[in-house]
């Protein structure tokens, strides 16, 4: 399954390409409707203000399928960022982290640590989550791959962070660090909607806001 932000658009220089992978035996078999990819697509549309397009895949909980999908999205489709949802618990069918680590060239443990800190605000079973983030490098291209939770509410909280009733940040979401990470691995510059998620960059890496 392929979706894009604009099906007729020609790929632009500096356009961010995002791969979305929902890992679910039942959703991929049509037993129920997948909620992960729609939730991710909607959040990205609200949070990113610079050009981007999406490559989406709905696949079963099979390690070979997950690995081959990640390789296709990074090596062939040239995605700069790949987000997976599902398959990160301790059950025997939960193999997304293993597949992600298998295609990586470098581990990025801080993302997984922060995801669990956010989830622990809600449930003690957050310590059972095995979500990881990695970088895959091939030739001159590199991508950040991150495992996210399976539920739409948890996806939003993980990416965006937690705010109090006045809008003050209680726990930072992981996406605030993603644009600068993409900068560092040679990807396109990502502008964000500060009302949803304000990207953090050191002053030396910031570009003037577009008017």
Image (cartoon, rainbow, N blue to C red):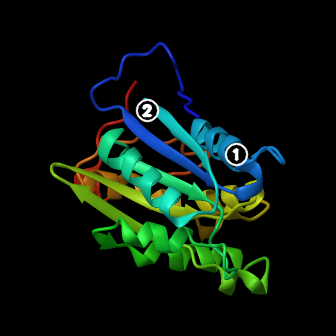
**Residue 1: x %, y % from top left:** 59, 34
Residue at position x 62%, y 80% from top? Answer: 117
Quarter of the rendering containing residue 121: bottom right
- Comparing labels 2 and 1, the label whose residue is closer to the camera: 1
Q: Secondary structure at mark 1?
A: helix
SS for tag 2? loop
- Residue drawn at point x = 31 percent, y = 60 percent: 136
- Residue at 42%, 78% in the rendered image: 109
- Sequence-wise, which precedes: disc 2 or disc 1? 1
Q: How dense is the environment of label 2, judged by Cα within 10 Å: few (below 14), some, or many (20 and up)? A: some
Image position of 69 with respect to 119: above or below: above
* 96 in relation to 145, above or below: below
| Residue at which label 1 appears | 39
Left or right placement of residue 19 versus residue 150 in this view? left
Question: What residue is at 37 percent from the left and 53 percent from the top?
Answer: 71
Query: Image height check: is 133 above or below 125?
Result: above
Q: Position of residue 17 (x, y in %)?
A: 41, 38
Residue farthest to the right, as pictured: 32
Residue 65 percent location from the top left of the image: 51, 56
Q: Nearer the viewer, residue 189 or 106?
A: 106
Q: Is residue 15 visible?
A: yes
Q: Residues within 10 Å of mark 1 (few under 14, many from 20)?
A: some
Q: Position of residue 200 (x, y in %)?
A: 41, 57
Q: Give me the disc on residue 50.
A: 2
Given contact means CB atoms under 8 Å apart, are the residues at marks 2 and 1 in contact? no
Measure the C-alpha gap from mark 2 to mark 1: 19 Å
């Amino acid at each position: 399954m392929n979706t894009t932000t604009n099906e007729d658009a020609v790929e632009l220089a500096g356009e961010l390409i995002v791969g979305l992978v929902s890992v679910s035996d039942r959703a991929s078999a049509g037993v129920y409707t997948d909620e992960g990819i729609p939730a991710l697509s909607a959040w990205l549309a609200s949070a990113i203000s610079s050009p981007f397009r999406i490559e989406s895949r709905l696949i079963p909980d099979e390690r070979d399928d997950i690995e081959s999908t990640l390789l296709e999205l990074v090596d062939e489709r040239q995605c700069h960022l790949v987000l997976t949802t599902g398959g990160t618990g301790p059950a025997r069918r939960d193999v997304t982290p293993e597949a992600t680590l298998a295609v990586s060239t470098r581990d990025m443990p801080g993302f997984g640590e922060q995801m669990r800190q956010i989830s622990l605000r809600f449930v003690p079973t957050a310590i059972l989550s095995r979500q990881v983030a990695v970088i895959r490098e091939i030739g001159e291209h590199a991508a950040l791959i991150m495992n996210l939770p399976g539920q739409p509410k948890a996806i939003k909280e993980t990416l965006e962070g937690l705010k109090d009733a006045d809008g003050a940040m209680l726990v930072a979401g992981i996406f605030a660090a993603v644009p600068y990470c993409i900068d560092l691995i040679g990807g396109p510059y990502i502008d964000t909607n500060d009302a949803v998620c304000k990207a953090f960059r050191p002053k030396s890496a910031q570009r003037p806001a577009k008017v």
